[in-house]
């Protein structure tokens, strides 16, 4: 679907950005030292930090990705919500307080607290860099994807805009401005999603979603005979790749437009309306008309509708949160899927309706990603377990989350802020279920792009809400990207330059080098965001979680709980975790399909998410290397003749 | 584990080593409880999907109830932990 630039959205977004930048410059005048740049001088209040956790963590993948997945496929998106949130339990009970006690500015600081080893500092810094870059790419791509429909600019403009704004934020006041940007964004996100959810519940459910007096998503399913007998209707014979497919093409001789219908019903006695995007000779046609918004042109129509409510009513009126889910469970929905038909000189993408029962959609396994849950294939189930493990273990291993712990005063504040984080993030993830389901039934979704489900849902209520939500969605990227660039900047300037290479710098120079690195990382992120425009964003976020969990978590946990951990063990575990998870991912069916464009069946590894294998292996490598490098006890004879062990 | 790192800038910890150890133990117990709850959820989804379709109460299926419960339970455990830590600090 084509989106007109919403002037309201641009204005509100410009307002947010200006406020944030003004705040940054003001705070920057006071943030001069390295401690201020990397850790906000440890002066952030625990409540502010807690909301900043939400602003740091809840990226476009959470807001747009999960709502979009739920709106198209039902329950499965919620599995990500649960996994993402559960990871904070690891953070609270295992990581938060020790990390705060042991470190100064970065994750490498904490890990190296006991050993003072350059090997640990280097490997931890590299791990931070790799994870941050993997996490940055989908954020930048997300920014480009968002900015096109929401603000009307092309992809690369979105990437450059985000990159530039974030670099300014980070360079002016480092962690201080980053914290307040994340705090503002976190609050706005949770508050407005709560408002939107309240509006969804208040609107209730209906089989006839309306926009003013126009009925939305009103797609017909008609008896075949009626469609074929319409005056001027001419049946287009099946040929080439159309043969054997459940479509009937009918040309209207009066307009010259060919419409595609899909066979429906037990004996194919019905035909269901579809939508088509045809690319022919470099031009695109939507539903037969040239793709555009001018007169004589056409666009795809919005979708998403309930076909039957329980009891056969047409609308329910306001519903409570539990009734909403119950009613959906008893309803039948119209979902949409698509199929590409490739002919020598034209490519047709057919978007077709398919009915789905609510009780089926509100169970795991209704989406392509998790369909393995419903089948017998053990590898697909292991893939699911691996993903849930990676999400659980990954949250507390993400460097840009860990560095937030250094901004508060002490470990008690670290603990309190994590609880605030859990409350706000958990609340938000509960809302995602309602936002996704609300979008599914709103009649306003874009059949080609489920990332737009949440903003379009807002649009179905009011253009103002759409403008606000769009601006917030964009600010969402700013918050997370700031955290990532700061983490990467710390890894290079503080960990590598100051602590590994031992480049002597006075405090002010340390800050300056941090800022220079931030600019470089920002530029790299912009370039990658433009290059990887077509790559699947959720795939990359999954990578980042798997690598973070495999590389960082074994080291952190064993350091805290096993006294025989050695510095070589830690360094080895990080290196092994990083490379094994990376290698596994590159050899997976997902990579074969999405990155190389090869047949996924040729993939080397049996399932795509490495966590289930690489995380335990990380622990094993740490234990083995630690035992091998343990300091030996040596017996030395005393003058009295007794033997005393000496370490 | 040392509670203060002499190389880092002094952020003053207000909790003693004994309190820290007690809190850590409480934290791990609560963590263990949550892990079991989480494993139960993942196991059922992978190997007993039909059970997730059952409706134990409230008219909602187990998948929805268990999923929401995991989110709510996380916050509940977090608050329990806070309360335990406050109590430990008062004893200190």
Image (cartoon, grey):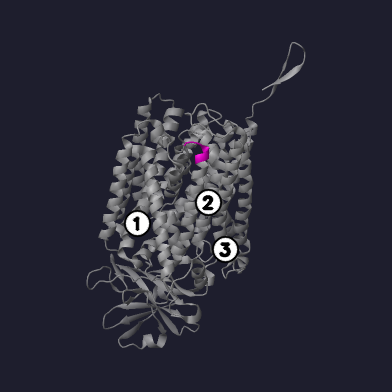
Residue A284 placement, left or right of A96: left
Report the Cα–Cα distance between label 3 and label 2.
20 Å
Q: Chain of mark 1?
A: A
Tag 3 secondary structure: helix
Residue on which the image places disc 1: A146
Furthest residue toward top: A639
Highlighted magenta segment, given as a residue range: A409-413
Residue A39: percent from left, percent from top: 42, 36
Do badges 3 and 2 share one subunit? no
Q: Which mark is residue A391?
A: 2
Q: Residue at x 48, y 56 (%)?
A: A427
Residue A521: percent from left, percent from top: 37, 40
Q: Badge 2: few (under 14), some or many (20 or more) residues near its Cα, within 10 Å?
A: many
Q: Quadrant of the N terminus of chain A?
A: bottom left
Q: Which mark is residue B65?
A: 3
Report the Cα–Cα distance between label 1 and label 3.
33 Å
Q: Chain of mark 3?
A: B
Q: Residue at x 36, y 61 (%)?
A: A455
Q: Is residue B90 magenta?
A: no
Q: Residue at x 64, y 32 (%)?
A: A628
Do badges 2 and 1 share one subunit? yes
Between circles 1 and 3, the one closer to the viewer is 3
Q: Is residue A38 above or below residue A72?
A: above
Q: Badge 1: few (under 14), some or many (20 or more) residues near its Cα, within 10 Å?
A: many
Residue A342: percent from left, percent from top: 38, 68
Between circles 3 and 2, the one closer to the viewer is 3
Q: Badge 3: few (under 14), some or many (20 or more) residues near its Cα, within 10 Å?
A: some
Residue A456 placement, left or right of B83: left
Question: Closer to the camera, A573 or A10?
Answer: A10
Q: Is residue A524 above or below residue A638?
A: below
Residue A600 in view in this figure:
yes
Q: Chain of mark 2?
A: A
């Amino acid at each position: 679907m084509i989106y007109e630039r919403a002037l309201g959205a641009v204005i509100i977004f410009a307002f947010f950005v200006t406020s944030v930048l003004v705040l940054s410059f003001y705070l920057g005048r006071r943030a001069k030292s390295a401690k201020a740049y990397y850790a906000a001088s440890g002066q952030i209040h625990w409540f502010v930090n807690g909301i900043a956790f939400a602003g740091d963590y809840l990226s476009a993948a959470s807001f747009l990705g999960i709502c979009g997945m739920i709106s198209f496929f039902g329950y499965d998106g919620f599995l990500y919500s649960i996994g993402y949130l559960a990871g904070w339990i690891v953070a609270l009970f295992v990581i938060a307080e020790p990390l705060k006690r042991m470190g100064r500015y970065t994750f490498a600081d904490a890990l190296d607290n006991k050993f003072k080893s350059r090997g640990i500092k280097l490997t931890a810094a590299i791990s931070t860099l790799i994870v941050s870059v993997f996490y940055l790419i989908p954020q930048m791509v997300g920014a480009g994807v968002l900015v096109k429909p929401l603000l009307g600019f092309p992809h690369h403009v979105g990437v450059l805009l985000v990159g530039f704004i974030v670099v300014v934020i980070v360079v002016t006041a480092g962690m201080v401005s980053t914290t307040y940007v994340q705090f503002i964004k976190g609050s706005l996100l949770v508050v407005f999603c709560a408002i939107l959810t309240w509006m969804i519940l208040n609107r209730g459910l209906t089989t006839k979603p309306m926009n003013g007096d126009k009925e939305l998503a009103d797609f017909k399913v008609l008896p075949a005979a009626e469609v074929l007998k319409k005056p001027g209707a001419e049946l287009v014979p099946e040929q080439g790749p159309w043969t054997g497919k459940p479509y009937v093409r009918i040309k209207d001789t009066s307009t010259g437009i060919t419409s595609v219908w899909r066979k429906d019903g037990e004996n194919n006695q019905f035909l269901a309306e579809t939508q088509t995007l045809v690319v022919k000779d470099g031009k695109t046609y939507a539903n037969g008309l040239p793709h555009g918004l001018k007169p004589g042109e056409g666009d795809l129509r919005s979708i998403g509708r309930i076909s039957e409510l329980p009891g056969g009513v047409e609308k329910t009126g306001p519903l409570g949160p539990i009734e909403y889910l119950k009613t959906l469970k008893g309803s039948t929905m119209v979902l949409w899927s698509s199929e590409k038909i490739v002919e020598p000189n034209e490519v047709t993408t057919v978007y077709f309706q398919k009915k789905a029962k609510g009780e089926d959609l509100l169970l795991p396994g209704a989406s392509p990603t998790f369909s393995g849950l419903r089948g017998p294939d053990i590898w697909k189930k292991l893939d699911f377990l691996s993903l849930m493990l990676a999400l659980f273990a990954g949250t507390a291993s993400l460097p840009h989350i860990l560095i937030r712990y250094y901004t508060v005063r002490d470990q008690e504040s670290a603990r309190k802020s994590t609880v605030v984080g859990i409350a706000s993030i958990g609340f938000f993830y509960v809302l995602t279920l309602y936002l996704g389901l609300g979008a599914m039934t709103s009649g306003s979704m874009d059949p080609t792009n489920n990332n737009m489900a949440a903003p379009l849902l807002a649009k179905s209520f009011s253009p103002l809400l759409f403008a606000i939500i769009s601006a917030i969605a964009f600010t969402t990227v700013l918050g997370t990207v700031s955290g990532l660039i700061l983490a990467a900047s710390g890894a290079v300037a503080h960990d590598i330059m100051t602590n590994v290479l031992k480049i002597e710098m006075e405090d002010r120079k340390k800050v300056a080098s941090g800022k220079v690195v931030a600019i470089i990382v920002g530029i790299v992120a912009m370039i990658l965001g433009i290059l990887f425009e077509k790559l699947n964003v959720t795939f990359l976020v999954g990578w980042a979680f798997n690598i973070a969990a495999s590389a960082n978590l074994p080291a952190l946990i064993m350091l805290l709980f096993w006294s025989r951990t050695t510095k070589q063990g830690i360094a080895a575990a990080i290196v092994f975790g990083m490379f094994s998870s990376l290698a596994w991912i590159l050899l997976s069916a997902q990579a074969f399909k999405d990155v190389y464009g090869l047949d996924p069946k040729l993939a080397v590894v049996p399932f795509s998410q490495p966590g289930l294998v690489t995380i335990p292996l990380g622990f094993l490598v740490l234990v083995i290397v630690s035992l091998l490098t343990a300091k030996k006890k040596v017996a030395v004879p005393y003058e009295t003749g007794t033997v005393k062990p000496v370490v | 584990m040392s509670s203060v790192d002499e190389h880092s800038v002094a952020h003053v910890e207000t909790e003693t080593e004994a309190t820290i150890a007690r809190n850590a133990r409480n934290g791990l117990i609560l963590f263990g409880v949550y892990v079991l709850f989480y494993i139960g959820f993942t196991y059922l989804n992978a190997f007993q999907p039909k059970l997730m379709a059952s409706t134990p109460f409230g008219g909602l299926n187990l998948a929805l109830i268990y999923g929401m419960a995991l989110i709510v339970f996380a916050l509940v455990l977090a608050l329990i932990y806070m309360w335990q830590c406050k109590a430990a600090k008062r004893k200190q």
